[in-house]
Amino acid sequence: MVALTLGAHAQTTTAPLEVVNSALTAVNDLGRQVVLGKMKTSLERMYPQWKERLSRRLGSEKALEKQFDEAVAEMMRQGTSMISFRTYGFPKVYEVFPGKKVEVVDGKEVETMINTKWLLLVPTEIRYRVMQKQEALVIESKGFQVAIADKNKLQWTFIDGAGLTVQEMRSLFISLPVDMELPEIKRRTVPREELNKQ
């Protein structure tokens, strides 16, 4: 087992390597589906409480789906397409979602507070092809996906890190540290010389 530093309640604990690998595989699969044009996958695999919150802000889940469809249609009208997706670096790992576990200690039942979910901040790199004045540019966007799963299931759901704030994260997962830092989000136009080397 490989130990990772966790940030829940600013305590150090460990996460098995299979948890990290499972999350990375799930995030990469999500990205692959979107690159293949299956954009709705990101809505289908969205963390349910986050999806519910976004739906409430817009009035309904149908309104959220409509806004999503309109954004995808606008990308296509502008000649923008996602051409690659990958994870990179090492994710930050947290334990979240307090719950209780009952154990028998010295013949007596004892309740223990535990965190029931894994939450990983997974750095991502997405490249888009954008048409501008008859010229194709490649834009690289470094961001992150928040991957969340019950510890006993590892069926991952996601929150896209674009525009996400620490306050929003902590309102969903109160055990996250107040001083947590989200991965940096950066965009750049990839120089043609760099593309030619690949």
Image (spheres, rainbow, N blue to C red):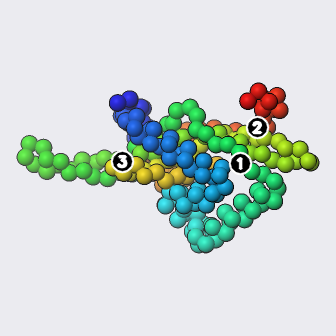
Where 144 falls versus 90 (above or below)? below
From mark 2 to mark 3, how far is it between C-alphas? 36 Å
Q: Any mark on residue 116, and which?
A: none
Kindly identify the amino acid type of the residue bearing the numbered disc 2: Arg
User: Based on the displayed image, in which of its 4 quarters is residue 11 positioned?
Assistant: top left
Q: Residues within 10 Å of mark 3 (few under 14, many from 20)?
A: some
Give percent across and percent down for residue 4: 41, 31
From mark 2 to mark 1, how far is it between C-alphas? 15 Å
User: Which mark lies nearer to you, 3 or 1?
Assistant: 1
Report whether residue 76 is seen.
Answer: yes
Report whether residue 176 is seen.
Answer: no
Give percent across and percent down for residue 6: 42, 36
The residue to which callout 1 is attached is 82
Q: Residue at x 44, y 38 (%)?
A: 20
Give percent across and percent down for residue 87: 58, 38
Counting residues from the N terminus, which is met first, the one under dot 2 or under dot 3? 3
Kindly identify the amino acid type of the residue bearing the numbered disc 1: Met
Give percent across and percent down for residue 191: 81, 32
Quadrant placement of the N terminus:
top left
Kindly identify the amino acid type of the residue bearing the numbered disc 3: Lys
Q: Any mark on residue 188, and which?
A: 2
- Asked whether the beta carbons under mark 2 and mark 3 sit within 8 Å of each other, the answer is no
User: Which mark lies nearer to you, 2 or 1?
Assistant: 1
